[in-house]
Amino acid sequence: MKYMTKGVCSRSIQFDVEDNIVKRVKFDGGCAGNSQGVASLVDGMNIDEAIRRMENIKCGFKTTSCPDQLANALKEYKANQ
């Protein structure tokens, strides 16, 4: 799935989900180290656990963050299944 982010430096997030496990997360743009770190940490994680851990994380004074946007993308994925 490709999710177009809102309110963060990254432009989009691509990922797959197989048997409720998050796979192959890739951020387009944003802070390279942070986005690679988040992608690596959630790879192989249960989708609900990933959402629980990342939702509502803020970046500085922004109302969202790249991890929060990934949680939103995963929630959207689940809603469309």
Image: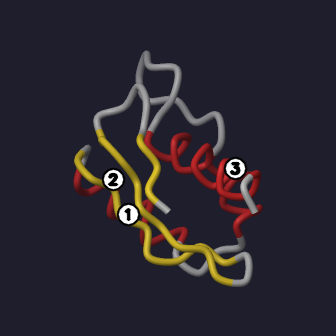
Q: Would you call the spot at circle 2 few (<14 residues within 10 Å), some (14-19), or many (20 or more)?
A: few
Spot occupied by residue 12 in the image (x, y as percentages of width and height): 36, 47
Q: Are marks 1 and 2 in contact (CB under 8 Å)?
A: yes
Residue 56: horizontal and vertical position, in percent?
Answer: 64, 34
Query: Real-space Cα distance between discs 1 and 2?
Result: 5 Å
Q: In the displayed structure, would residue 51 be above or below residue 15?
A: above
Horizontal relation, residue 29 to residue 19: left or right: left
Query: First in sequence: mark 1 or mark 3?
Result: 1
* The C terminus - image quarter: bottom right
Q: Tell me the colour scheme of the image.
A: secondary structure
Pointer 1 local density, CA inside 10 Å: few below 14, some 14–19, many at least 20: few
Going 43% across and 68% down the picture, which residue do you hit?
Answer: 25
* Residue annotated with mark 3: 75
Which residue position is annotated with label 1? 37
Sooner in the amino-acid sequence: mark 3 or mark 2: 2
Residue at 53% from the left image edge and 50% from the top image edge: 70
Question: Residue 14: which quarter of the image?
Answer: bottom left
Residue at the spot of label 2: 34
Residue 78 x %, y %: 74, 58
